[in-house]
Image (tube, rainbow, N blue to C red):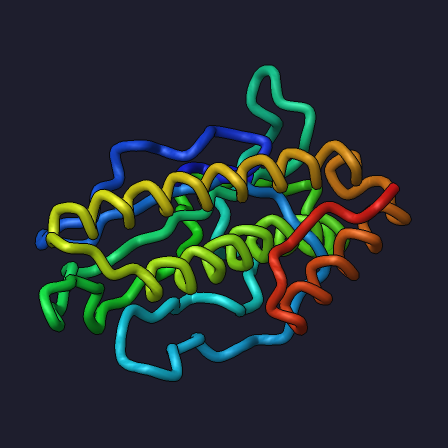
Amino acid sequence: MVQEASMYRHPSPAQTNRPGPAAPSEYTPHAGFASAQPEGADVPPAQPGPALVGWPRTIAWSEFRDINKRPKGETENAQISVGLRHGKVKTVEEHGEYKLGEMEFKIIVKKAESWVVKSEKTEQLLVHEQGHYDIAGLCYRDFLAAVRALQEVSRNELLRQVNGLMAEHGQRAVSLSDEYDVDTEHGLNQTQQQSWLNQIAASRESGTPLTAPAI
């Protein structure tokens, strides 16, 4: 999976993503993924502040470009590129400290960078790609929790910390996604694939950070 940081067996996170008052920007990790999850609602925070949208949800092959054969050097039949896009950055000052105001971070599939060999479209492969998307979602869920807790003495320092956390959690998504591909052999090892799906589900339900399943 590729994440904006392209998250997955694929490009590493882009470090040029900088929250700013401008139009939506993206951070991408790369991916690949597991069993499809039920369509879920966006996850708004309980308190005012930044919200994560676009996950959890079920992805579809329509979000990938169809290609006739694997790109040169590739050993898998699909690749997903996941991005984290933010809208206008809003900050709030309270008692001399700055924190993020109400704004959205949206997880997206970057279709231009996501592809599937059209003759190889299977439910099993889509489940594997879903796993990549969920790995990104879980890492960015943790990112959201971290940025919601930030309070800094200046707006610039706040945005610097947000950028650092974005890079940190994006890189974590890339690392986990790469490990997921290796362990599952890009979804071909069904025993390991199921172990990862169970681990992903447990992290979603418990709210604890995702870790690779024990071998």
Q: Nearer the viewer, residue 122 or 212?
A: 212
Q: Is residue 68 left or right of residue 54?
A: right
Query: Total label count?
Result: 0
Tell me if residue 24 comes above or below residue 164 in the rendering: below
The vertical placement of 57 against 133, above or below, is: below
**What is the x, y in percent for residue 114?**
48, 41
Residue 117 seen anywhere in this rendered image of the structure: no
Q: Nearer the viewer, residue 184 or 199?
A: 199
Q: Quadrant of residue 163?
A: top left
Q: Residue at x 54, y 35 (%)?
A: 67
* Position in image of residue 26 (x %, y %): 29, 47
**Relative to the observer, which residue lies in front, 152 or 176?**
152
Q: Position of residue 88 (x, y in %)?
A: 14, 60
Left or right for 149, reference 87: right
Q: Residue at x 57, y 16 (%)?
A: 72
Instruction: Answer left or right for 116 relative to 145.
Output: right
Q: Residue at x 28, y 46 (%)?
A: 161
Farthest residue to the front: give it: 95
x and y, in percent, of residue 173 in the image: 54, 43
